[in-house]
Each structure stands twice: as C-alpha cells, then as structure tokens.
Image: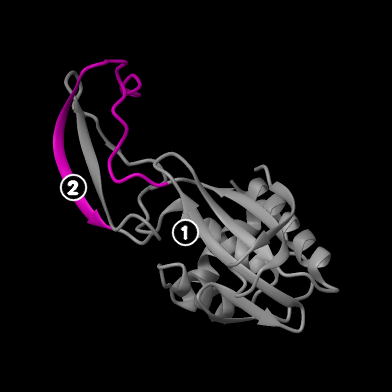
C-alpha cells in the first residue's frame, strides 16, 4: 500500500486556514454489484458454462455502500455452485475497506472507543466488539501494533484532538478508488503523528 504524502498545504478542514501536513492512504474500494467479467473455469470439471441460479440482495456495513448484489452461479456440466461478490466484499457483512479503517485507526494509536467515534463520524458506526474482532483478525497476519497510544479523542466531524495535536479525517472516494485523508495541524507532535499514520499504513499493507 502506497502512502501519498504531500508537502504542507493550506486547508480549511481544521477550522482555520493553516499549513497542514496531508497524508492520503488508499483503501479497498467498494462496489454495489459484481464485476461484469467472465468467470474462471469450474474448479471441479473445468467447464466454462454457468447459469445464474440466484440474485441475493444483502444489507452491508460500509461508509458508501449500503446494499450489494451477490450472484450465485451453477456450473452447467457438474452442478457445482459458486458465489460472486462485488469488489470490496466477501461473505462478511462488513466491507474490506471498513475493516481496513478499523485496523488503520487502531494501529495509528487510538483506543477502541475513539475508533468507534471516528467511524461514526465517517458514516459507518460499529461496536467496539466488532472493531476489536477486525483488529485481532489482522494482527496475526501483520504482527503486533506499534507500542503506545496517541492522546487524541474523537470530538465529532471527523476531528481528533488532544495532547498529541489535532487531526481532521475524511474519506475520498470514486467508483474505483477510495482513500482516508488525514490533515495534521502544525505542532510539536505533527511529524510524529504523520510517522504513526505511515507506520499504520505499512502494517495494513502487510495484512492485506
């Protein structure tokens, strides 16, 4: 995963015009329907032919997609069934991007309660239990989170404020791409916070 780092730039997201450090971290995009592309050969018999057996509409948890279509195909030759999910989704009701957000915010140095507050601000609230499960699932793949915690609290509107500084978080998305954008206000800990974001993004890349 590549972290796009810009030079300090002027922004109004922090409530005043300041020279903020900008960090943009790509996340897995999300689509509402499966891609229109050929299916791979049947794993059982090698056939290329399938029939659409079922179209299932599911409610999901994601900042931008609320419902997805899951297609169930049946092989014409041997009857083996397979499901095809939209980009960014699997059998779980949570999108891959939402799980990544949980892991990223926790590894940044936020407590579960603060991660929950940020997710609510970004339009997709989750319980602390769900957040913890997402983190524990990724931890075995990517290793332990960085030591220590940032002294920041979610204060609404995607803002984090505390002894370690001030950060404004928002999501940018298109049909094919999505990113978490962090604007870090100037201060004695601004470079450290940026380093924590970059370290969290590197761990997230290892977990994917």
Name of the residue lying farthest toward the front: 17
Q: Examine the structure image and report whether residue 187 is included in the region drawn in magenta.
A: no
Q: Quadrant of the N terminus?
A: top right
Where, by quadrant of the figure, is residue 188 drawn? bottom right
User: Which secondary structure, mark 2?
Assistant: strand
Q: Is 72 rendered above or below residue 76?
A: below
Q: Residue at x 69, y 53 (%)?
A: 203
Q: Position of residue 128 (x, y in %)?
A: 50, 77
Foreground pick, 169 / 61: 169
Q: Earlier in the sequence, mark 1 or mark 2?
A: 2
Question: Viewed as shown, does residue 83 lie left or right of 177?
Answer: left
Q: Which residue is mark 1?
A: 98
Q: Residue at x 62, y 76 (%)?
A: 160
Q: Position of residue 130 (x, y in %)?
A: 46, 71
Chain part drawn in magenta: 30-59
Q: Examine the structure image and report whether residue 36 is included in the region drawn in magenta.
A: yes
Crowd class of label 1 (few under 14; some 14 to 19; many from 20; radius 10 Å): many
């Amino acid at each position: 995963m590549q972290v796009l780092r810009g030079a300090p730039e002027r922004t109004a997201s922090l409530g005043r015009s300041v020279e903020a450090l900008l960090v943009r971290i790509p996340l897995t995009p999300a689509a509402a329907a499966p891609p229109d592309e050929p299916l791979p050969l049947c794993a059982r018999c090698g056939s290329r032919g399938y029939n659409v057996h079922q179209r299932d509409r599911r409610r999901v948890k994601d900042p931008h997609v609320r419902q997805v279509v899951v297609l169930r195909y049946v092989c014409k030759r041997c009857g083996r069934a397979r499901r095809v999910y939209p980009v960014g989704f699997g059998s779980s009701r949570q999108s891959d991007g939402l799980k990544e957000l949980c892991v990223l915010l926790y590894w940044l140095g936020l407590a579960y309660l603060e991660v929950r507050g940020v997710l609510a601000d970004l339009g997709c609230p989750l319980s602390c239990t769900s957040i913890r499960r997402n983190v524990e699932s990724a931890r075995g793949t990517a290793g332990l989170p960085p030591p220590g915690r940032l002294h920041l609290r979610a204060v609404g509107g995607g803002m984090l404020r505390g002894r370690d500084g001030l950060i404004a978080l928002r999501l940018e998305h298109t049909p094919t791409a999505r990113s978490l954008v962090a604007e870090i206000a100037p201060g004695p800990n601004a470079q450290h916070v940026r380093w924590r974001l970059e370290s969290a993004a590197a761990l997230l890349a290892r977990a994917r």
